[in-house]
Amino acid sequence: MAIPDPGTWAAGLVTTSMMNTRLRDVENWLLNPPHVHCFRTATKTGTANNTFVLYDMDTELYDWSVSAMHDNSTNNSRLVAPEAGVYYISAHIRYAAAAGGARGVLIRKNAAGNPVSGTALIERYELPSSGNTGYVHWSGDFLMSANDYIEMWTQQNSGAGLDVLPGVHVTYLSMIWRSKT
């Protein structure tokens, strides 16, 4: 769905059709812009030590857009921007408990599944307290062109393989359109 154009008003008779096109449709867009929230339903087991692992997502809490922003089976690591604009992107990762090392997240735009391709948006690491579950959270606004997409990688360096835990509010990637550029 394209961002509705409120147009300009001309002198003369205001019709219902004009009101619907120029007010209702714009208001509906602003009240319910494209947005998506995706996650995995199963643990991503044995995330290798000191290796970027692309995070695929098989479930959506919501995906509102005329053209889907996420597909659960094809390129399911991607969230696609249907319109150009500023998008608020949020990522949260929960690693299994383990002592030592850092836990990280990498978000890249248009990377085609490669952690060194495309454009890096964020790379963030956290140090969990000894033996506790490691969480990494990040969010921010970014400019996206129509059909740009983002992908998320996990990385940890605890010294051994480490699971990434699943769940709608445990490990997820979400994106919502905020404004035109």
Image (cartoon, helix red, strand yellow):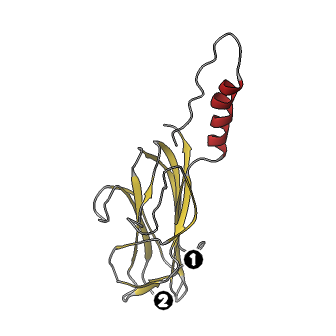
The residue that appears at 48% across and 56% down in the rendered structure is: 69
Element carrying mark 1: loop
Q: In the depicted view, which residue is nearer to us: 61 or 20?
A: 20
The residue that appears at 52% across and 80% down in the rendered structure is: 128
Q: Position of residue 54 (x, y in %)?
A: 37, 71
Element carrying mark 2: loop
**Amino acid under disc 1:** Gly
Q: CB of mark 2 within 8 Å of CB of mark 1?
A: no
Q: Position of residue 163 (x, y in %)?
A: 45, 85
Near mark 1 (Cα within 10 A), the count class, few <14, some 14-19 or many ≥20, is some
- Is 124 displayed left or right of 112 in the figure? right
Given this view, does label 2 or label 1 mark the residue nearer the observer?
A: 1
Q: Is residue 60 above or below residue 68?
A: below
Q: Position of residue 47 (x, y in %)?
A: 39, 82
Near mark 2 (Cα within 10 A), the count class, few <14, some 14-19 or many ≥20, is some
Give the numbered dot on residue 98. 2
Check disc 1 and report the residue beneath it: 167
Q: Position of residue 13 (x, y in %)?
A: 71, 14
User: Residue 26 is drawn in which quadrant?
Assistant: top right
The residue that appears at 41% across and 62% down in the rendered structure is: 78
Q: Is residue 176 above or below residue 53?
A: above
